[in-house]
Image (cartoon, rainbow, N blue to C red):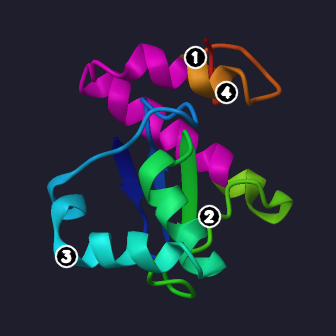
Amino acid sequence: MRCLHEKRFGSIFNSWADGKTRYNTESMSGLTFKAMQQAAANQKEISERVDILVHRTAEELYDIANDPGALHNLFTDPAYQERIERMRLTMLNWMEQTQDPLLPKFRTTIAAKTKANTEPSNGVLKN
């Protein structure tokens, strides 16, 4: 996972997310997560939250100021597409500068979701 946090927004890239692979972390072995799983059996909202935590999506965007619990992924909201593109470019530049080993996967993921496919130095992402 990679995260970019601005004053108001947080963007997450989950390189492994494919809708099938399960995310598992130490905090998911504790009592709180087990209680959430039990409550999910008959509470739709909790069931949806458990599914988000377990499967995640490749890209996430949260308005931390208005949604401090990061419960509502804004990634598919058309009103935030320009911000998503800017944050992708910032993430791409950072990953290039640090020679991040997830860079090829990030490029592949975002290339499939962006309109243009040219050099990053032109301000647009390239696969």
SS at badge 1: helix
Q: Which residues are magenta?
A: 84-107
The answer to whether residue 1 of the structure is visible from this angle is yes
User: In 3D space, how far apart are the residues under numbered discs 3 and 1 (Cα atoms)?
Assistant: 37 Å
SS at badge 2: loop
Which badge, 4 or 2, is on the more N-terminal residue?
2
Q: Is disc 3 in contact with disc 2, using a CB cutoff of under 8 Å?
A: no
Q: 58 or 113: which is nearer to us?
A: 58
Q: Position of residue 82 (x, y in %)?
A: 74, 53
**Amino acid identity at mark 4:** Val
Which badge, 3 or 4, is on the more N-terminal residue?
3
Residue at left offset 76%, top offset 53%: 81
**Amino acid identity at mark 2:** Asn
User: In 3D space, how far apart are the residues under numbered discs 1 and 2 (Cα atoms)?
Assistant: 21 Å
Quadrant (top left/top right/bottom left/bottom right) for the N terminus? top left
**Amino acid identity at mark 3:** Leu
Q: Which residue is mark 2?
A: 73
**Amino acid identity at mark 1:** Thr
Which of discs 3 and 4 lies nearer the camera? The answer is 3
Q: Left or right: 126 with respect to 77?
A: left
Which badge, 1 or 2, is on the more N-terminal residue?
2
Q: Which residue is mark 1?
A: 108
Which of discs 1 and 4 lies nearer the camera? The answer is 1
Q: Which residue is mark 3?
A: 31
The answer to whether residue 120 of the structure is visible from this angle is no
